[in-house]
Image (spheres, rainbow, N blue to C red):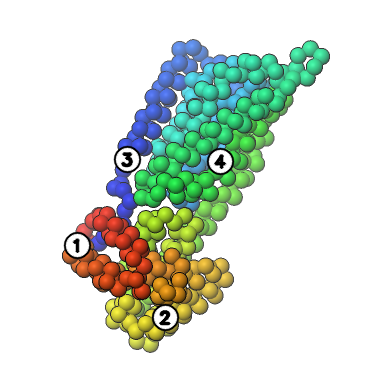
Amino acid sequence: MRERRLTARPVGLDSGQLLLICAAGMLTVAGIAHTAAEGLTDPRVAIGFGALIAAGELARLTMPGNREVAPISTAASLGYALLLDVGGRPAHHSALQVVAVMSVGMIAGGLPHLAVGRPPRLDAMARRLLAGSLLAFAYRPLTGPLGELARDTGDRNGNWWPALGVMAVLVTIMLVADVVIAAMHRADQVRTAFAVAVRDEIRMAAPLGAAVAASGILLALASHSMDMTALPAFAAPLLVTQVAFRKYAGIRATYLQTVRALSRVTEVGGYVEPGHSRRVSQLSVAIGRELGMAEPQLLELEYAALMHDIGQLSLRDPIPGGATVLADPAQARRIAELGAEVIRKTGVLHGVAEIVRRQCETLGESPPTASRIIKAANAYDDLVGGSTDRDRAAAALERLRLDGGSAYDPGVVEAMARVVDRLVLVTRL
């Protein structure tokens, strides 16, 4: 028996990720070599920030969408890159020393994870290093004149506004560049439109990035009066925020696992073929990406696709093979409505329930896009099942095309045809 799975890209690093990692590697070598040759400027400050970066990497977390982030590490890196003075003493370290401190801190924080079999994502670390390095190279040459304006001179107070303005502008540019790079990689990895990937990155990653950037700026400014005590003072609230994000990510992952387990009830009960819900879910999400759906919509689509057949539990006599595509339209609608009622009783999945309820509607009734996708993906899997035979797949797609215009959305069917062409055989059981 052969199993097929939908994959956006074979396992491994693509050329863009390799380029990013190589660039970060060369920067690391250059920064460490330069710092070793010139000596460490203000070792106490460098070690303090390096330790905070390492602690941040040790406490990194994975956000929804498989995004690896290290808020404390990033804030410490930005703070060190933007540092004007510490306790009134000017900070004269170079951009290459910033690179060296960031690199050593990231490596030190990643080693414990590596030792317990949780290797860090090199592309994510490379992005964090490059973002901080670019900011350092743009900002460190300006620290001389900005520091003179900021420090008290004679009988007048220093003017911090020019430094704050430059920090804000450069950090904003850095965040925009980071979002664009992340979107380029994500668009290539999950096969979605670049504009959609940018929108998803802005929605999912930018809020945390803005908070971390603001913390980095405040850390650099606070070091003027608080000296090194600014590090633990700003690390504490960031740690609390990171714990909250970790709990949110954990709850979301647990929720999806619960939905997946619930979706298997129909399989265990013999109402549908083994693996049907999982296959329909994978195919539906791939079609949704092909059509440019955003991540929150894809999550709802995944939930709905996993539970689209749960209404079959109400049947006394299961449909042969669970193939609702062969069932009477009235019966199929009844199954969808019963399934929606079950989902609605959870009290938190009203949108998912509505998608499931409307999955059997005709195009003339204007069902939502997610319902149209599930209807087409379910019909395809009912006809093809776990088979990887290309002729069988082509015949199923042709049948859906012939039924299109009223039963199936032609745009969804064509998107599914493109997805099916990218099916990859990954294992033989």
Q: Nearer the viewer, residue 107 or 181?
A: 181
Mark 3: which amino acid? Asp
Q: Which mark is residue 390?
A: 1
420 lies left or right of 282: left
Q: Which residue is mark 2?
A: 333
Disc 3/disc 2 C-alpha distance (Å): 44 Å
146 lies left or right of 400: right
428 lies left or right of 86: left
Q: Secondary structure at mark 4?
A: helix
Q: Residues within 10 Å of mark 1 (few under 14, many from 20)?
A: few
Q: Secondary structure at mark 2?
A: helix
Among the two numbered marks 3 and 2 on one chain, the one whose residue lies closer to the N terminus:
3
Among the two numbered marks 2 and 1 on one chain, the one whose residue lies closer to the N terminus:
2
Marks 3/1 in contact by CB < 8 Å: the verdict is: no
Q: Which mark is residue 14?
A: 3
Q: Which mark is residue 209?
A: 4
Disc 2/disc 1 C-alpha distance (Å): 31 Å
Among the two numbered marks 3 and 4 on one chain, the one whose residue lies closer to the N terminus:
3
Disc 3/disc 1 C-alpha distance (Å): 27 Å
Label 2 or label 4, whichever lies nearer to me, is 2
Mark 2: which amino acid? Arg
Q: Position of residue 220 (x, y in %)?
A: 64, 28
Reply above or below: 243 against 4: above
Is residue 112 among what the camera can see?
no
Reply above or below: 358 against 198: below
Residue at 21% x, 59% y is 428
Q: Residues within 10 Å of mark 3 (few under 14, many from 20)?
A: few
* Residue found farthest to the right: 155
